[in-house]
Amino acid sequence: MQETKLVRIQKYISDKGVMSRRAAEREIELGNITVNGSVAKLGDKIDPSSDILLWNEEPICEQNKKYYILLNKPTGYITSMEDGFGRKTVTELVKDIPCRIYPAGRLDLSSEGALIMTNDGDFANSVIHPSFVHEKIYHIYAFGKVTKEQVSLLSEMRDLDGVKISQVGVRILRLYENHTILEFKLNEGKNRQIRRMCEKVDIKIMQLKRISIGKVHIGNLSSGEWRYLTSEEIKSFGRK
């Protein structure tokens, strides 16, 4: 008799191309995944041949076609699949994609710009996992005139609220009478890192926009619009 092979729920969901393992773990913790009618717990395993797995009361189906897109996320949208507080989610902007895709990374509610979305769990992992280094470029519109001293402090910052951070490339792009445009280059990023760094040196942000992720650039893509990644852009994240 052949032994039943059990698999962790988050791995099963990721293998189906529905979302990344990390995203699946969040959905489990939120109570959005059920197995045979019972709410799943983190660490649970299933028998794919017999167990009935539902996500938000819908079956988790095989998604054979892989989608890789770049969204120019507007402000006012959260990078989650759903929200219990009635806020707008980025999924509302990609409804014309014929399957569920999810963000490979995050931008906070007040931030905008480049956001990669996909239904390929392995690809999402290659975009967001710290072991893969993909430079991200941000343009920051700050109130007032930012000084060279403030820029130096940002560039030299290696500790943020007790947590070590890698060097961030910071330079002034434009200096105006009432505002300054800064460029930040990060190889890794902590939660709200740029905003927190700016707070430390008394820089007040009025706009934060991610311009690029690795070799994927926002270009002339309008706010709220999306495009497919090119084959070369996909390959740049280590995918064939």
Image (tube, helix red, strand yellow):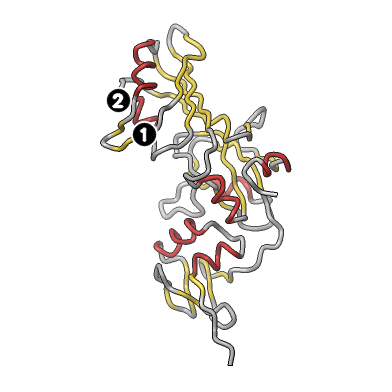
Q: Is residue 143 above or below residue 4?
A: above
* Residue at the outermost top position: 177
Q: Is residue 34 above or below residue 221?
A: below
Q: Where does residue 79 sit, x and y in percent of width and height? A: 50, 46
Q: Residue at 53% x, 56% y: name it.
A: 20
Q: Quadrant of the N terminus?
A: bottom right
Q: 136 or 207, which is in the foreground?
A: 136
Q: Residue at 55% x, 46% y: name it.
A: 90
In this rendering, the label closer to the viewer, 2 or 1: 1
Q: Residue at 40% x, 67% y: name it.
A: 42
Q: What residue type is labelled 1?
A: Ile
Q: Which mark is residue 73?
A: none
Dot 1: few (<14), some (14–19), or many (≥20) neighbours within 10 Å? Answer: some
Tell me whether circle 2 and circle 1 mark residues in contact (CB < 8 Å): no
Residue at numbered disc 1 = 165
Q: Is mark 1 on a helix, strand or loop?
A: loop
Q: What element carries label 2?
A: helix
Q: Is residue 215 left or right of residue 80?
A: right
Q: Quadrant of residue 160?
A: top left
Precedes in sequence: disc 2 or disc 1: 1
* Residue at the outermost left position: 162
Count of all numbered marks drawn on residues in the image: 2
Q: Where does residue 178 sit, x and y in percent of width and height? A: 43, 10
Q: Which mark is residue 200?
A: 2
Residue 88 visible (yes or no): no
Q: Residue at 63% x, 48% y: name it.
A: 94
Q: What residue type is labelled 2?
A: Lys
Q: Is residue 19 left or right of residue 97?
A: left
Q: Where does residue 209 sit, x and y in percent of width and height? A: 51, 29
Q: In which quarter of the image is residue 211?
A: top right
Q: In this view, does 167 lie above or below 149?
A: below
Q: Could you tell me how far apart the alpha carbons at marks 2 and 1 are, in whole angstroms?
A: 14 Å
